[in-house]
Amino acid sequence: MERWVDSHRFALILCASLFFAAASLASAGPEAVAHPEIWAAQATLPPQASTPQTLAATSKTAEQTKTEQFTLSHERQAKAVAYSRAGYTLYFVSYFLGGLLLYLMLRLGWAAKFRDIAENASDKKWIQGLVFVPLLFLTLDVLKLPVHLIWHSLSLHYQQSVQGWGSWCWDWSKGELLDISFGIVLVLILFAVMRRSPRRWWLYFWFPEVLILFGLMVISPLVIDPLFNKFEPLNKEHPDLVASIEKLTKHAGVPIPPERIFLMEASRKTNAINAYVTGLGASKRVVIWDTTIQKTSNDESLFIVGHELGHYVLGHVWQGFLLGAAGLLLALYLLFRGLHWAMDRWAKDWKLYGQEDWASLAVLLLLLQAVLFVSSPVISGYSRMQEHAADVYGLEVIHGLVPDSEEVAAHAFQVLGELDLSDPNPPPVITFWLYSHPPLADRLVFAHSYDPWSKGESPKYLK
């Protein structure tokens, strides 16, 4: 699963435009419109893996010494650095390539040609949209496909992914169908609003867009996620773990019945570990990957689940949604102003006749590409704050339920780093720009040292 922002996809871009909710609401890989967050993956990197021998060595070390620092063997550290640097490079290449392709499609007249094809197909606007949107999106996706192929090749080379090319291509195809379907709906609404209110469309489009994003949060666990992975009740194979998670969720004040605790068969595609809490209302559930159970102890799995519960208990989902909705409104206004600025200068060169021209969608996507890129540090910084708070909550919620809870949490990060080939020393500018979570080495040190109880201090969240 890839975790770059594919900003040429209109549906995904507008989801990502929930600026401050990006970490909570969606990843922008080809598999999902609103995929649950990866528990501890860095912002730009996909799930990664390790070898059984490495994990065994890590566990043996943990029995002998405390896990006070994130450490990797010399060979594994070299791989982690190389793999991470490749991820950083491909992230920026993906953004640059997306912007370049959109510009070339405008400059060479491709967007205008797609518009002409759509208008020749029918006089009805909704039929024109059904023709234009797939033409634009699929062309862009196919042109950017080499970047995704390179990334999956790297993941296989570094033994991070176990997904075969046939399965990967099928997931990419399903992702395309979803992206195009959601894109058609959003674009038809957008251009209908544009035609009705040329000067206020940015405001009037904001209302249905927020409702659609809210709906995606609710239906994704029920409809979208099962298209890419198999889920079954965790109680079916791991009743003891379910009982432990139930105690944890009740202690957290968010009791979740056993029928809402699921196992995801992630091992078919990745060696990464993860657990997450997702959905709203009737769709709310705890999901734990089978790889997590295979490669961590039950206590470590509980800390991972506790971290995810922190997002719900601390209101991160709703905070992110509300702040993100405000960010979306700002983004739409900037697009409105930017579109008029671009049309005044280049409409004739790009063969565009107005903002209601279907081909102007390419201009909007190019502008949004720039807005999202510039806003990345804000999104990442806000997300890191929430993730640190969730780490604190996870440590507090397992305290008293898990023996030596600080060591358990620290060792969970060590195992995660081994599995994910986490960069032990990411460049500060990369952390600032891209990391949705604090660097893993920092999280491990904090987990091992956070102990207000022994100091007679009050915990931050669970008094």
Image (spheres, rainbow, N blue to C red):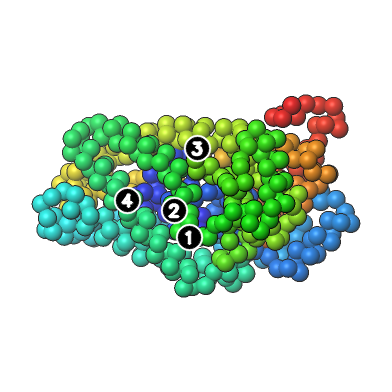
Element at label 2: helix
Q: The residue under label 1 is which amino acid type?
A: Phe
Q: The residue under label 3 is which amino acid type?
A: Gly
Element at label 4: helix
The residue drawn where x is 76% and y is 49% is: 299
- Which of label 2 and label 3 is nearer to you? 3
Q: CA distance from mark 4 to mark 1?
A: 19 Å
Binning the other alpha carbons within 10 Å of mark 1 as few (below 14), some (14 to 19) or many (20 upward) gives some
Q: The residue under label 2 is which amino acid type?
A: Ile
Q: Residue furthest right?
A: 64
Q: Viewed as shown, does residue 19 lie left or right of 158?
A: left
- Which of label 2 and label 4 is nearer to you? 2
- Which of label 1 and label 3 is nearer to you? 3
Q: Earlier in the sequence, mark 4 or mark 1?
A: 4
Q: Earlier in the sequence, mark 1 or mark 3?
A: 1
Name the one closer to the observer, 14 or 240.
Answer: 240
Element at label 3: helix
Q: CA distance from mark 2 to mark 3?
A: 17 Å
126 in relation to 210, above or below: below
Could you tell me residue 241's position as x and y percent? Answer: 71, 51
- Which of label 4 and label 3 is nearer to you? 3
Quadrant of the image occupied by residue 207? top left
The residue drawn where x is 79% and y is 65% is: 56
Q: Earlier in the sequence, mark 4 or mark 3?
A: 4
**Residue corresponding to mark 3:** 281
**Residue corresponding to mark 4:** 183
**Residue corresponding to mark 2:** 224
